[in-house]
Every structure is written in C-alpha cells, then in structure tokens.
Amino acid sequence: MNIISQRVQEMNFSQTFVMSNKARELKAKGHDVISLTLGEPDFNVPTAIQEAAIDAIHKNFSKYSPVPGFLETREAVCKKLKRDNNLIYQPSQICISTGAKQAIFNVLAAITNPGDEIIIPTPYWVSYAEMIRLLGGIPISIHTTVESDFKISVSQLEDTITERTKAILYSSPCNPSGSFYTQQDLKEISDCLKKHPSVLVISDEIYEYLVYEDEPFSIAQIEGMQERTAVINGLSKGFAMTGWRLGYSACPEWLAKAVEMIQGQVTSGTNTVAQQAAITALHMSPNEPEIAEMKAAFNARRKLMYDLLQKIPGLQVSYPKSAFYFFPDVSAFFGKSFNNQVISSGDDFSMGLLENKFVGSVGGDSFGNTNCIRFSYATSENLIIEGMKRLSDFITELS
C-alpha cells in the first residue's frame, strides 16, 4: 500500500533547489563549482535591520504574535505601500507571512476550488503551478518567448480566459526572465480584465526594488483593480533577508479575512523577531545607501553578464529590465550531445553544464519553458566572468 497521498506523488521538487543541492554535492567532492542557481542576494542585511532584530531579542519578543502579524508591522506595510506605490490599505487588509511563498499559497488556498483555472504566463516561478495543482486547481499557461521579452499580449490573455478562470498569477519583476510589465502594459491588461470582472489578480512584486530602467508599478494602482488584486511582496530580495522568511499580502478586506483564517490553521503568526526587524526595513526607502548600493551592484553585473552572453554564438538572450536573472534560449543546441548524452531540453543542457563544467544553472522546464535556462547574477563579477567562459567552452565542445 502506498501511504503517500496522490497529490504529493504528483508533485515535483523545486528545480532551483534540486540544482542548488547538486551543485553543493559536487563542491563537497572537491570540484570548483560556480553556482548561478539560487536567487539569493550575496549581501549582508543592512545594519539598522540587524540592530532592530537584536533589540527585539533583548526586549523578549518571543511570544506568539497575532495571526496576521503585529499591528505595528502591518502599519509599516501600509506606510510602505503608500510611500512607494500610492496605494491605501488598512492594517486589517495585510497579512504578514513566513515568506512571500506562503503569502501566495494563502491567497491561492483562499480562492481555489477543484477545477478552477489559474492563468500563469510562462516563464513562471517554479512553485506557481505546483501550488495550484496541490489545491486542486488547473494551471493554464500562456507561452511567451525571447522575442516578446517574455511578456504576454492582451490578445493571448483574452483568448485564454474561460468561464472557469478564477485568477491570473504572475510576477513583475519576473523570476525567472527578469522581464517587467510597464505601467502601459498593465493598463492594457487591466482593460482586458475589466471585461471579466470575476477574474482576480495575484501580483507577485517581490523584486520591486530591483527595477533598473523604469519605475516599479503595481496593477493595483490602476483604477478599479485594487479591489480585485492581491499584492504580494516581502523582504528577501530588496533587503537580502532570504533566511528571515518575511513576506506579506495586501488584499481586499474579504480576501484578507480568508487569508488570515488559513494562516491561523497552518502556521499562525510569523517569527516575532523578524517582524520587529521588518518594521525598520519597511521604513527604509529604496534610496537608502545600503539598499541603493545593492541595486547598483546588481545593475553592473546585469550589464556584464549580458555583454558576455551576447558573445556566445547560438544563444538567444533578452536584456532583462529587472530582478537578477537571465533566461537565455538554448534550443539551438538541442540534438547536440556531451559524453554521448543528447540534449533535448533546457534541463538537459543545465545538467550537462553542471556535470561537465561545474557551472550551476536551472533548466527552464520547471519554469514552463523547456527551451531556456536560468542564470542568477547574484554573485561576484569574477564568478560571472569565469562562469560565462565555462558556458562558452561547454557549447564549443558539444558534438
């Protein structure tokens, strides 16, 4: 008898962690591995946030918090949303969660019935489709390409919406492509969605502070969209606080209550020390020196990696406007082989690159686009240079 549930048997492991763990295994065996897998800033948490956490420990913030988070933390989120996005929320509409991943899952769990369709433009973050399936929903992909800058068109969206569509879930800035929906893009998408008032929006904005050539913009800022949008954000990317596990959702009141109910039955309130430190973080503007320095460093690495990728024949690559990823199309190498192994997907290419040249990346299959692979440039310029050299060597040696 198989004791594991059918829903778990049908799940896939997160490919980002699979490849990261494989890279660690090779490194432990003594190989010189360059890992360009995880989306994790290689910077320290800003000093003021560290000090706020230490102060919270000394003040014995060690008891349960309210399920949706301390009032002060939720008030800080409201102030941040007003300052950065010109969005007005009440603390009752905010839920502080154990990372943005939980915030997304909470919202999906609150709205998804078996058979509901959730639209996810590809490429999408690896957990989106698995979360939807776990809840009995049906992920419906809209395919995009390098040529479209990995962004959907309004006509694609219109053609995909059915009577079973419950919501559209996307990230902008996007993991894994680094693409970014501009204000005009979102205005056009909103005009389409307004023809379908029952379709909700889940807007994952975790990379908001890493937009390089425009200003961040949320679809919730468009008239008529805030009351049907769940805004997701957190502290992992903009403040280098990945391990602190602090995310949040900002929702219409009716949805916020459902999210709170779900979180109360699953995890209850988020880590209290992280919540107290988050108050300090949320009061910091993106122009604070330590925050701005991180963004400037990522921008320099973006330019460097783009220059190096462009010089490698056969790769198709777009110039990402945000986040810290490249998502080059490697389909020109399908049918070629290494060590008598034929490449037929982005996952094959990624594994070959790791096993032969010890460069970690993530294949595109789990992002919904088998033609591509993802590189993270959340690492030093020296490692980017060496990693791209090894990539070029790997491609040259394919037969």
Image (cartoon, rainbow, N blue to C red):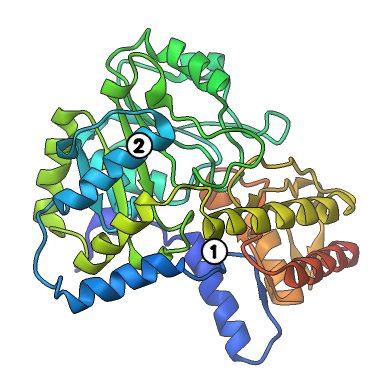
The answer to whether one can see residue 29 in this image is yes
Mark 1 = which residue? 41
- Examine the rendered structure and indicate whether residue 116 appears above or below residue 241: above
Horizontally, is 131 left or right of 254 in the view?
Answer: right
> Residue 185 lies in what quarter of the image?
top right
Horizontally, is 141 left or right of 166 in the view?
Answer: right
Real-space Cα distance between discs 1 and 2? 23 Å
Name which residue type carries label 2. Answer: Leu
Horizontally, is 347 left or right of 394 in the view?
Answer: left
**Towards the viewer: 61 or 219:** 61
Residue 55 rendering spot, x and y as whole percentages: 26, 73
Q: Residue at x 64, y 42 (%)?
A: 212
**Number of on-image labels:** 2
- Examine the rendered structure and indicate whether residue 361 appears above or below residue 218: below
Residue 7 rendering spot, x and y as whole percentages: 27, 53
Mark 2 = which residue? 81
Residue 249 rendering spot, x and y as whole percentages: 28, 42
